[in-house]
Image (cartoon, coloured by chain):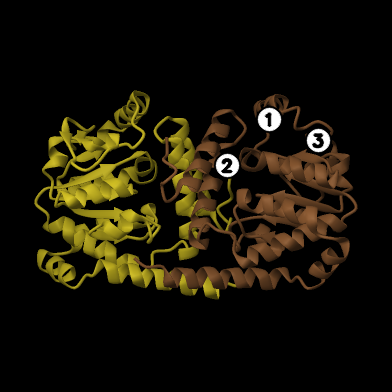
Chain colours: A yellow, B brown
Amino acid sequence: MIPKSHPRYESLMKREKIIEFFERGILAKAGLIAHGRGEAFDYIIGERTTEYALKSIKAAASLLILSKKPVISVNGNTIALAFNHVIELSKLLNCPIEVNLFYKTEERLRAIKKFFDENKEELEGIKINFGGSYIIPNLESNRRFVSEDFYYSDTVLVPLEDGDRAEALIKMGKKVITIDLNPLSRTSRVSTITIVDEITRAMPLLVRYVKTLSRKEAEDILKSYDNKKNLEDILKYMSERLAKLKL
Amino acid sequence: MIPKSHPRYESLMKREKIIEFFERGILAKAGLIAHGRGEAFDYIIGERTTEYALKSIKAAASLLILSKKPVISVNGNTIALAFNHVIELSKLLNCPIEVNLFYKTEERLRAIKKFFDENKEELEGIKINFGGSYIIPNLESNRRFVSEDFYYSDTVLVPLEDGDRAEALIKMGKKVITIDLNPLSRTSRVSTITIVDEITRAMPLLVRYVKTLSRKEAEDILKSYDNKKNLEDILKYMSERLAKLKL
C-alpha cells in the first residue's frame, strides 16, 4: 500500500488503477506506455489544473452545452481513470458513449463489456455503442468503424485520442474536444478544443461547468476562446516551470 | 510494420522492442509505464544526444576507466534496449553485470536467464550476478540484496535506476552513473554523473569513449565536470526548446 502522505500519492494511485485495468484486459500494452508519457508531461505541468486548462475546460463545457448531437468516445485508459465522470457527463448531456479502441480485439471488448455489466446500475438509461458499420473517411486504423450515433454527431469528446483519428474527425466537419497532457501532440494541435490536463482532474470540472453554465454564458465563452493561443500559453507556462524548477 | 520513413521510426521501434520483452516476461508492467515517461522527456529533448548529454557521457566513460571495481547493474528495460552495448562495455572494463530488479519474481528471473542462455556466446567470459546475500543499507525494497561484487564495487553504472536505490548507493560511498531522461528525477539529482539521454543513443557513445580516452584525458575530463551545472544546462535547454517549438 502507498501511504497517503507520499508526495506523489495521487499519481501512484492512478498508476495502480491503470495496472489493475490492464490486468483485467481492458487496457492495451500501448495504454500503459501512453500513461507513462502522460505522467511525464503532468510532472512538468505541476500535477495541477492550470488557469489555461481551466479556460479550455470551460470552453469545452460550453461547446458540449450548445451541441445538438454530442457523443463521448472512450478507450481503455479513459474507462480505467474516468469511468464515473464519463457516465455523469453522458447523463447530463443525454448523449451516447462510444467505445472505440485502437488495439481492438474480441478479448478486450469482452473485458469491457464485463466491466460495464458489473456497473450496470450506474449505466442505466445510457446508450453505449461498440462501433458499427459506419466508416470515418481518411482513416486506416480499426478505429474507423463507428456507430450511426457517432457518425452523425456534431461534437465528439475524445479524451486521450490518437492523432490520426482526431485529424479525420476534423476533416469530417466535426468539432473535437480532447484531453491530452501533451500540448505538442498532433491531437492537441488539430482539435477544436484541447484540454491540457490530467483526465481525472479535468473530467469533474467539465461536469461541473456543463451543469452550471447557461447557454448565454456558453456562447460568450466560446466567442472569446482561442485554442491555438491557449496551447501557446500552456507551452510558455511549461517552459517557465522547467526554467524555475530547483535541482 | 512501421515504415522506415515514419518521422518517429526510431521511437516506435524501441516501443515495439519494449513490448516484445514485456511479452517475454523480462519487463514488468511498471517498466512499460516508465518507458512512456522516458518517451515524453525524449520528445522534449528532441530525440537526439545534446551537447550536455555528450559531456556527461565523456565524464562517465572517464570515471569508468579510472574506477578499480566498476559494475554494471541492469533491469528489464536495460536488457530490452541496450543488451549488446552492456555486454560490450562489460568486456571492455572487464567488470561483472548485476541483474537487479525492482519487481523481482522467480518468473522474471527465469525469463531473463532464458534470454541470457539464448545469447550465451556473446556472454562468454562475462560474470553475471543475480543478486546475493549482501545488503545495501538504507534501502527497503527487494533491490537491497546484491552480490559480493556489487557490494564491494567502487562505481556502479545503473541505467534507468530508481531514486531510493540511487540515494542508498551514494550513502554507501559509491560513485553512481545513471542514464535517465528526466533531469528532475531523484536519481538524476543524487547521482555522481547523470546522463540525460536515451539509453540506446547513450550506450554506444559511452562504449566509444571508454575505448578511446586515455587515463590522462579521463582525469582532466573528470576534473572539469560539474554534474549539477550540467543538469541545470539541460533544464535550460529543454525550457528553451518548449518555448521555441512551433504549434
Disc 1 residue crowd, few under 14, some 14–19, many 20+, Cα 10 Å: many
Residue at numbered disc 1 = B112
Label 2 to label 3, Cα distance in Å? 21 Å
Q: Position of residue B33 (x, y in %)?
A: 52, 45
Q: Is residue B240 above or below residue A26?
A: below
Q: Chain of mark 3?
A: B
Q: Earlier in the sequence, mark 1 or mark 3?
A: 1
Q: Earlier in the sequence, mark 2 or mark 3?
A: 2
Label 1 to label 3, Cα distance in Å? 12 Å
Label 2 to label 1, Cα distance in Å? 14 Å
Q: Chain of mark 2?
A: B
Residue at numbered disc 2 = B31
Label 2–label 3 contact, CB within 8 A: no
Label 1–label 3 contact, CB within 8 A: no
Q: Place residue A233 in its image quadrant.
A: bottom left
Residue A148 in sight in this render: yes
Three-letter code for the amino acid on which mark 1 is drawn: Ile
Horizontal side, residue B13 vs residue B199: left or right: left
User: Quick one: SS at disc 1?
Assistant: helix
Horizontal side, residue A25 vs residue A61: left or right: right
